[in-house]
Amino acid sequence: MLGEMIGEFHGKSTGMRVLPGDDYRYVKIEISYMSQGTLLGEPAQDMGTLETFERLPGQTYGSGQGMLFGAGGGVIYNQHGIGTMSGEGMSSHVMFSAACQAPTDGPLARLNSILIVGEQDIDAEGNITTRLYEWK
């Protein structure tokens, strides 16, 4: 069940590159990003890298990792999800889940015992809006 919204971030894609796919008929796209927002009420900065590929026409699958930095300490996360491309450049809507490794005490410690589910909107200019929810 989808729980409360625990964070929101706004940022931008900072780089992209094309990588060989696992099969000669496909390529992967590596996307790096940076954003700022709040997580569990704490200001935070987020940076990460995803590898994504089109697995069905118009649908992408991606996985990646990142780091969050804030007053509550540093958090490492791994994520994976699926996206739907809008047809306007690289713009897409992505749904994902993430698992975190956070400090064992302090305001972000709760992240160690929850699964995050989120959605992300990326426009044609690389602007990113991310909303994070606790899965209960």
Image (cartoon, rainbow, N blue to C red):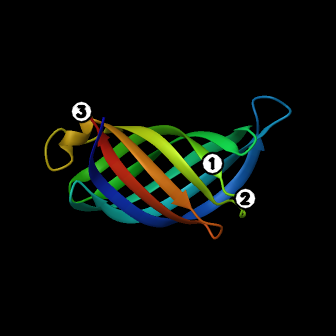
Q: Position of residue 114 (x, y in %)?
A: 27, 35
Amino acid carrying label 1: it is Thr
- Horizontal side of 70 relative to 104 (left or right) equals right
Residue at image position (71%, 53%) is 17
Q: Are marks 2 and 1 in contact (CB under 8 Å)?
A: no
Query: What label does residue 87 carry, if any?
Result: 2
Tell me the mark number nearer the camera, choosing from 2 and 3.
Answer: 2
Q: Are marks 1 and 3 in contact (CB under 8 Å)?
A: no
In three-dimensional space, the C-alpha distance between marks 1 and 3, rounded to whole angstroms, equals 29 Å
Q: Residues within 10 Å of mark 3 (few under 14, many from 20)?
A: few
Can the viewer see residue 8 in this picture? yes
Q: Is residue 64 above or below residue 24?
A: below
- Give whichever of discs 2 and 3 has the lower sequence position: 2
Q: Position of residue 117 (x, y in %)?
A: 39, 42
Placement of the C terminus among the 4 image quadrants? top left
The image quarter containing residue 98 is: top left
Residue sitting at 49 percent across and 51 percent down?
48
Q: Earlier in the sequence, mark 1 or mark 3?
A: 1
Q: Position of residue 71 (x, y in %)?
A: 21, 60
Label 3 sits on what residue type?
A: Ser
Q: Amino acid at mark 2?
A: Gly
- Quadrant of the image for the N terminus? top left
Where 14 sits versus 19, above or below? below
Mark 2 crowd level (few <14, some 14–19, many ≥20, 10 Å Cα): few
Identity of the residue drawn at 56% across and 53% down: 93
Residue 113: numbered disc: 3
Q: Which mark is on residue 54? A: none
Instruction: Name the foreground residue: 132 vs 71.
Output: 132
Residue 83, x across and y down, in percent: 59, 46
Residue tagged 1: 84
